[in-house]
Amino acid sequence: MKTRKIFAMLLAASLIASLASCGNSTDTSSTGSSDSGSSSSTDSGSAESSTPASTKTDSGVLAATTDITAEDILARDYSEPITISFAGIQVTDGLDYNHGNEYYEWWTDTFNVEWDVTSLTFDNWVERLNTWINADDLPDWSVWNFNAGDAANYADQGLVMEMPEDWKTQYPNLAAAATCSPANEYYENLYGGMYYFFRPVFANNFPADLVTNHMSVYIRTDWADQAGYELKGLEGMTIGQTEFFDYLRAVKDAGITEYPWYTTSGGIGTFLGRVTEANGTMESVYYKSSDGKYHWGPAEEETGVKATLKQIKQAYDEGLIYPEFYTMQSPDDAGHFYASGDGAAAIAEGMASQFDRFAQEMENNLGLDFWEVAAPLIITDDEGISHDTPSTNYWACNILSPNMDEATFERIMSIWDYGCTEEGQLRIRLGVPDVDWKYDEEGNIVNLVKDTEYGTLDNKYTSTYPITGNMFILSDDYSFINPGFTDEARQRVTDLYIRRAEISSTIDEEVDWDLSSYSSQAMNLATMTYSDEYANIITKEGDFDTNYDQWVSDKMSMIQPVLDELNAAFCE
């Protein structure tokens, strides 16, 4: 495995051609789509030939070049009221997504729906959805953390809905947006039908030539100054793994706070994946090494998993990490940073919406200016490298219950289709036209919320992103140009993506489609939640090396059959 890959363009000429429908801008490879691994997809026949193309509009959102417009979708008959059950991690328990405000009400009134919402967390997301799927008791629409091993079985058993053959022509705006992630075409071909809607992260707007993750660490720079600790990578917007723990140690030693890092098991896993070889750590624990064979990352020294986990264990034993971090759930961990004010660091999404959220929360709860006392930074290893996996340009996927009636299905698909039009995207991203935004005389978008008491759309409507905001095209793409976010947030997210692309390690590799789509009984039996496994090792008493080696030994009885299968199937 390479430790440092050469910085390379993400999109080869073949990929640019294959994903031209995503509407790249002419000056950057801004689809944000995957690597050249997607160019190996085969012709899918007449169904694929009917997939509509899309273009980038002047307003920077995806617009399908089809005959079905937003106006056509809104003109459909929605006289029959429909209740739609929905489950996802981006909804907040207790919020009224039906009649809570005029933003929500436009969607519920226009499409004549009522949302029956179940809020999941990162900690229970996988378990609860898999339980519902296997019990044939899915909500009408769920956002699922795709797992290829389970996906093949669910499709084969009919536990998730297969799209009708004409879905691309009936919902062409959705079909056009789906072309932005090569995973949609790949798995549709693999399973012989469309079961999973992979939600594209980027479609039109991207400041760099490489697609990277956006997870960041938020640091209290004022506390670093107070503790007399110099953040060496601050100007370059980075913080190395050892520097991170040195900073936490300095804050604790200065008596500023008792436990500098309030995090979750998932936060530990995110940190680990960004500072070790990402192939072999979290996202893909199996990887093909330089010997041409598949290996299991936690068992291999070259991935750095054991060494880094030992460093985290030491920090835990020193009291730098909240002792019961494994019981915490998001966003309670971030709340210690921006609400109670006793957290020196937080792992969270590095998006403009999050920056504005942190800024508003810190001002409201602590009376502090976020940009004066804090900074979102890129997590790197001690060589200044930010580790990543090759991008397939999606995060999570939409699945539908096979048990819903036709009317409910058509209503959901119409909402998705509308959300992928230019009009739909502007309503999602900017709010209510002529209330939250408008066009000026030159046709430029003017944000009407920024100078009000709310400041941001998220503040005005409590939370605009659940259900509508990320129902298909994700919010990341538009954040670079969204006038609904502050100038500071938009500039920072742009700078971070550019910088992260410059120092990424594995992003230039091709997606290993053989591995990503492989499924077997052995692989299913070897499935585990690695962030929880790592948390157990961190908190276990006794000698770390002994505990870790024993854990690897115990797991190998499940892992080795998977490695044997992969090597037999794909390695000479």
Image: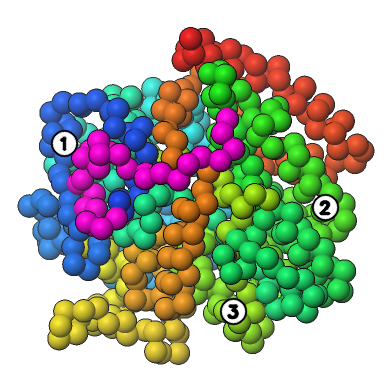
Q: Earlier in the sequence, mark 3 or mark 1?
A: 1
Q: Is residue 8 magenta?
A: yes
Residue at the location (15% across, 46% down)? 53
- Mark 3 in CB contact with mark 2 (< 8 angstroms): no
Residue stretch rendered in magenta on the structure: 1-28
Residue 373 location (% of width, % of height): 64, 79
Residue at the location (30% across, 51% down)? 29
Disc 3/disc 2 C-alpha distance (Å): 27 Å
Question: Which residue position holds label 3?
Answer: 370
Residue 283 location (% of width, % of height): 55, 38
**Mark identifier at residue 440:** none
Disc 3/disc 1 C-alpha distance (Å): 49 Å
Regarding residue 248, the answer to whether it shows in the image is yes
Q: Residues within 10 Å of mark 1 (few under 14, many from 20)?
A: few
Q: Is residue 290 left or right of residue 141?
A: right
Q: Is residue 68 above or below residue 247?
A: above
Q: Residues within 10 Å of mark 2 (few under 14, many from 20)?
A: some
Residue 184 location (% of width, % of height): 32, 37
Q: Is residue 402 left or right of residue 90?
A: left
The mark closer to the camera, 1 or 2, is 2
Question: Which residue position holds label 1?
Answer: 166
> Which residue in the rendered view is the most extreme toward the right?
542
- Mark 1 in CB contact with mark 2 (< 8 angstroms): no
Residue at the location (57% across, 79% down)? 371
Residue 236: name its quadrant.
bottom right
Residue at the location (15% across, 57% down)? 73
Residue 109 location (% of width, % of height): 27, 68
Disc 1/disc 2 C-alpha distance (Å): 55 Å
Question: Which residue position holds label 2?
Answer: 316
Q: Earlier in the sequence, mark 3 or mark 2?
A: 2
> Which residue in the rendered view is the most extreme toward the front?
6
Q: Nearer the viewer, residue 136 or 39?
A: 39
